[in-house]
Amino acid sequence: MDKNSAWSFLDSAAEALELPADVVAGAPLVELVGKRELRMDNHRGILSYGSEEISVSGGRILVRIRGRGLELSAMSEHSLLIRGEIAAVELE
C-alpha cells in the first residue's frame, strides 16, 4: 500500500467512525472537561509527574498539563485521566 492509499484508507475509516484522521492514525486525542479533568487517548506514557505539572508523551507531540492538585486518576495502556485544577495545556 503506497502512502496516498494509506491516507485514503485512514480518511475513509475516520469518516466512518466520525473521528479526525489524525486520531485514527494514532495521534493523541485530548479532551478537556471544564478546568477539573483531562482525558487523553493514544498516549505513549508519563514523562514527568507532579502535583503542579504532568508531562505526557503523545508520540510526536508532548502534552504538558499545568495546574494545582493534579493527579493521575486512571491509566490504561492507551488512555489516561488527570484530575485537579487545570490552568493550562501546552503542546510541543
Image (cartoon, rainbow, N blue to C red):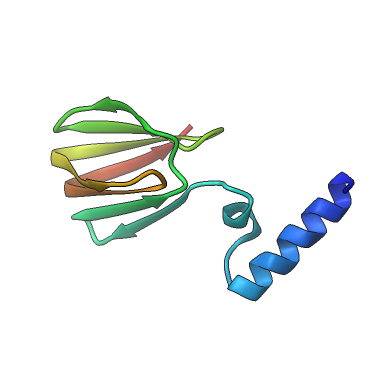
The answer to which image quadrant residue 87 occupies is top left
Q: Quadrant of residue 48?
A: top left
- The residue most toward the top is 48
* 29 on left or right of 86: right
* Above or below, comparing residue 11 to residue 57 in the picture: below
Spot occupied by residue 3 in the image (x, y as percentages of width and height): 85, 45
Residue 20 image point, x, y percent: 60, 62
Q: Residue 33 location, x and y as percent?
A: 28, 62
Considering every residue shown, the one lying at the far left of the view is: 69
Instruction: Give the residue displayed 43% in from the left and 41% down from the top.
Output: 43
Is 42 or 55 nearer to us in this picture? 42
Residue 63 vertical position relative to residue 86 in the rendered view, above or below: above
In the image, what residue occupies the spot 49% across and 47% down? 28
* Total numbered badges shown on the rendered structure: 0
At x 65%, y 58%, the residue is 21
Whether residue 40 sits left or right of residue 83 in the image: it is right
- Residue 18 percent across, percent down from the top left: 59, 73
Residue 91 in the image: above or below residue 82: above
Q: Is residue 84 left or right of residue 12?
A: left
Is residue 91 depicted above or below 10 in this figure? above
* Nearer to the camera, 6 or 35: 6
Going 18% across and 49% down the picture, which residue do you hit?
83
